Image (cartoon, rainbow, N blue to C red):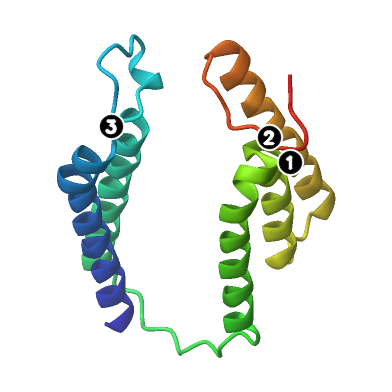
Amino acid sequence: MQRIKRQSLIGIASIIVAAVLMFAIIPTWVSSPSNVRNIVLSPLFWPYILSGLTVLIGLGLVVTGFFTTDPVEPEQPAISGGYGRLGILAAIMTLTMFALPRLGMVWTSMLIFAATAFLIRTSHPRAAIICAITVPLVLYGFFAHVASVAIPQGNYVRLP
């Protein structure tokens, strides 16, 4: 019964958080210029999409939580070093805020992606390195050259 209850509570909490985002936080804190021609490029589009998906996932959790009759599994032992990794992740996030204005969004994303991948001990380190390099570069290429959106550049190395 505990597992069903927990799953439903997580679903209800996600619905409440998404509703607060959709009706209070996004309209108040995300500004959008009135002359945006393409809705996908509007700063309001993706926060609303993510909030809507959070509602759908929350509804799915609530429904499956009420109709699941699996027996309760015994408590799993705590993973050693979990709090240490959580602290390191908080340090990575803090360093991200300091590195963004100095290194730029692309280079910072590469470093943070790689650091996070190795923090969680990925079983595919080569793929993580390849993705850490190519995904930010491809996104930069799309947004800077196709969508004509300015991507913050760093003080040291500038991309074309």
State whether residue 143 is above or below residue 153: above
Quarter of the image with the C terminus is: top right
Give the image quarter of residue 139: top right
Q: x, y percentage for residue 156?
A: 77, 37
Considering the numbered disc 2 on the image, is that residue within a helix, a strand or a loop?
helix
Identify residue type, mark 1.
Answer: Cys
State whether residue 122 is above or below residue 50: below
Image-based side of 73 in relation to 99, left or right: left
| Disc nearest the viewer among 2 and 3 | 3
Provide the residue designation for mark 2: 135
Do callouts 1 and 2 mark residues in contact (Cβ within 8 Å)? Answer: yes
State whether residue 79 is above or below residue 131: below
Image-based side of 12 in relation to 118, left or right: left
In this orientation, which residue lies closer to the viewer: 9 or 143? Answer: 143
Considering the numbered disc 1 on the image, is that residue within a helix, a strand or a loop?
helix
Give the image quarter of residue 119: bottom right
The residue at 56%/54% (across/down) is 97
Considering the numbered disc 3 on the image, is that residue within a helix, a strand or a loop?
loop
The numbered disc on residue 113 is none
Provide the residue designation for mark 3: 31
Provide the residue designation for mark 1: 131
Identify residue type, mark 3.
Answer: Ser
Q: x, y percentage for residue 136?
A: 67, 35
User: Residue at the right extreme?
Assistant: 126
Q: x, y percentage for residue 48?
A: 28, 36
Q: How many marks?
A: 3
Query: Which circle's residue, 2 or 3, is located before the other in the chain?
Result: 3
Q: x, y percentage for residue 2?
A: 29, 83
The residue at 74%/25% (across/down) is 159
